[in-house]
């Protein structure tokens, strides 16, 4: 059974412009960065990730926590919240 996290990971692997590796650990989505300028583009990474998730998965019933690291050091953590119910 595919989980929302696994679907998001597959989508990010095919559509995102960052990261050398996107994986899951427990319920966290892990993004590993490469390159000397990786720390300079963290806001863009978060904006692109959030936009792609909201575009492809507008209805979400769970929180998606992300951890971004560079050389095994966490440089950013953020979450994409559940979507609001449509009435």
Image: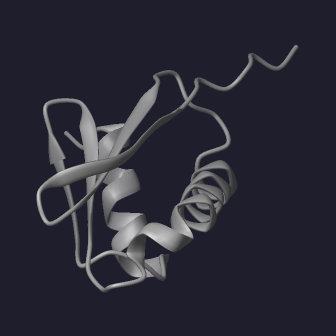
Q: Viewed as shown, does residue 24 lie left or right of 67?
A: left
Name the quarter where the C terminus is drawn.
top right
Picture layout, residue 68 above or below residue 2: below
Q: Can you say which quadrant of the picture contains the N terminus?
A: top left
In the displayed structure, 52 sits above or below 6; it is below
Compared with 77, 81 (above or below) is: above
Name the spot of residue 65 as percent of width and height, x first: 39, 33
Q: Residue at x 32, y 65 (%)?
A: 10
Instruction: Name the image quarter holding residue 22.
Output: bottom left
Quick check: 48 above or below 72?
below
Question: Residue at point 59% right, 23% down?
Answer: 82
**Image coordinates for residue 34, horizontal then vertical, percent:** 26, 80
Q: Where residue 37 appears, x then y in whole percent?
A: 42, 82
Q: Residue at x 26, y 36 (%)?
A: 28
Front residue of 25/74: it is 74
Q: Nearer the viewer, residue 62 or 44?
A: 44
Residue 11 percent location from the top left of the image: 42, 66
Residue at image point 48% right, 37% down: 78
């Amino acid at each position: 059974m595919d989980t929302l996290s696994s679907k998001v990971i597959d989508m990010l692997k095919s559509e995102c412009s960052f990261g050398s590796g996107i994986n899951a650990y427990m319920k966290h989505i892990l993004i590993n960065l490469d390159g000397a300028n990786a720390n300079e583009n963290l806001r863009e990474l978060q904006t692109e990730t959030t936009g792609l998730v909201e575009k492809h998965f507008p209805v979400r019933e769970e929180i998606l926590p992300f951890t971004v690291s560079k050389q095994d050091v966490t440089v950013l953590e953020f979450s994409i919240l559940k979507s609001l119910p449509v009435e």
